[in-house]
Structure formats: C-alpha cells, structure tokens
Image (spheres, rainbow, N blue to C red):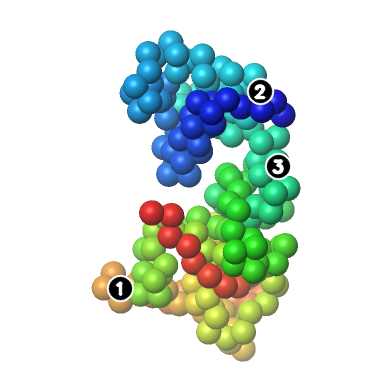
Amino acid sequence: MEPLTEKQQRVLKFIERKLKENNPPSQKEIAAYFGLAQNAAYQLVGYLKKKGYLTDSGRHRGIRLSKEYLRSVQQTGGVPIVGRVAAGEPILAEQNIEDYVNIKELLGLSGDVFLLKVSGDSMVDEGIMDGDLVAVKPVPEVENGQIAVVLLDGEATVKRVYIQKHRIALKPANEAAGYKTEYIKRSSRSVRIIGKVIGCLRTI
C-alpha cells in the first residue's frame, strides 16, 4: 500500500473513529471537521481510495475501510472486532470483521481471541454496557456460571451460562429492566456456545 501524507493520515484516523462509532462520515462532515472546502475533502477521500485504504459500498455514507488495510492492521498484532456472529458462517469471516485494534500485546491476549461489539443492556449489572467490546476466547463449552457468547436462533448474545441436565440456562444481568432467564433444551440446534468472555473494553 502506498504511504500517506500527514493530512491523509489524519483524515483516515478520523474516518476510522467514526466507523467504530457506527457513524460513517459524509464528505461534508469531513470538510467541516478539518476546516476544508468540500472539494478538498472529496480529493482527500479519493486519494485514500486510490491508495487502497478506503472502499465505497455505493450506498449513502457507504465509505468503508478496505480489506487490504484491515489485513495490514491485523498483521501488526491487531485483535479483530466482530460486528456480528451468524449461523453457518465462520466467526472471523471477512464480512463480519469491522476493524482491528492493537491491544493484543498490551492485554496478553492469545492469537485466537476476538472482540465482539455488544448490543443491548441485558448485562449492565455485570458492567457490560451497550456498545462495549467483549474479549472472547473461542471455546465449545464453558463452566457453569461463566459469562459467554452464545449463538441463539442465529444471533449472538452475551449471557451468564448454566449447563443443566436437559437444558441450558442463559441468565441476564439487569435487575432494573426485569429480564428473564431463558431456558433452551440441550438438544436444540438453535443454541451454540461461541466462547467465554474474558474481558470488556469501553470505547468511549
């Protein structure tokens, strides 16, 4: 990949930050943030695309980090952020990875750990908030009472897991909201343990 100028690097980091916030910036917003004419912002984004750092989905606010750039971050020790876990797909399929963060050496994480973006408030009493990133160690089974990522009816959920004789209990942690424990038959194909939660990161 071609090297970037200092201004191009600043624009790229701004776009990365906005994408992590799930708020892809428009060229007008980029121009306003850096005090540029909109045409200058258009040119900067164009250079980032030409040099292979950005791509465009073709939709409104469709700017994205390129797979080539994401791979380059991964090679420097980045931990993947997974935006979704879907049934029938590898967890770390390229289409599921939103970004990489360079925290592997800092936290002493092993190579197979990934970060999953949490959606919802069902685990706030455990200190896991909506929008947090949980560090997940992929394992097919967890010990009773561990917090884990579970694929339930095709969607990932974070819950405290209890393995019982004929069923699995998925216990939330939000007493104020009154969420109820879910019970699923162990023989059910709709439930699968993805991994245990070994940490939580707050992005703001």
Q: Earlier in the sequence, mark 3 or mark 2?
A: 2
Residue 112 place in picture, x, y as percent:
71, 63
Task: Identify the residue shown where x is 59% and y is 58%.
Answer: 103
Residue type of the residue flagged with mark 1: Gly
**What label does residue 178 carry, if any?**
1
In the picture, which quadrant includes the N terminus?
top right
The answer to whether any part of residue 120 appears in the image is no
Give the total number of marks visible in the rendering. 3
x and y, in percent, of residue 150 in the image: 58, 67
Q: Is residue 111 positioned above or below 84 on the image?
A: below
Label 1 sits on a secondary structure element that is loop
Q: Earlier in the sequence, mark 3 or mark 1?
A: 3
Is 142 displayed left or right of 131 in the figure? right
Residue 73 in view, yes or no: yes
Q: Which residue is mark 2?
A: 51
Residue shown at 55% from the left, 49% from the top? 83
Residue 33 image-quadrant placement: top left
Tell me where residue 202 sits by quadrant. bottom left
Given residues 185 and 17, the one toward you in this image is 17
Q: Earlier in the sequence, mark 1 or mark 2?
A: 2
User: Residue at the left extreme?
Assistant: 176
Q: Circle 3 sits in a helix, a strand or a loop, which is it?
A: helix
Mark seen at residue 71: 3
- Callout 2 amino acid: Lys
Nearest to the eye among marks 3 and 2: give it: 2
- Tell me which residue sits at (48%, 15%) in the image: 42
Q: Local crowd at mark 3 within 10 Å, few (<14), some, or many (≥20)?
A: some
What is the C-alpha distance between the residues marked 1 and 2?
51 Å
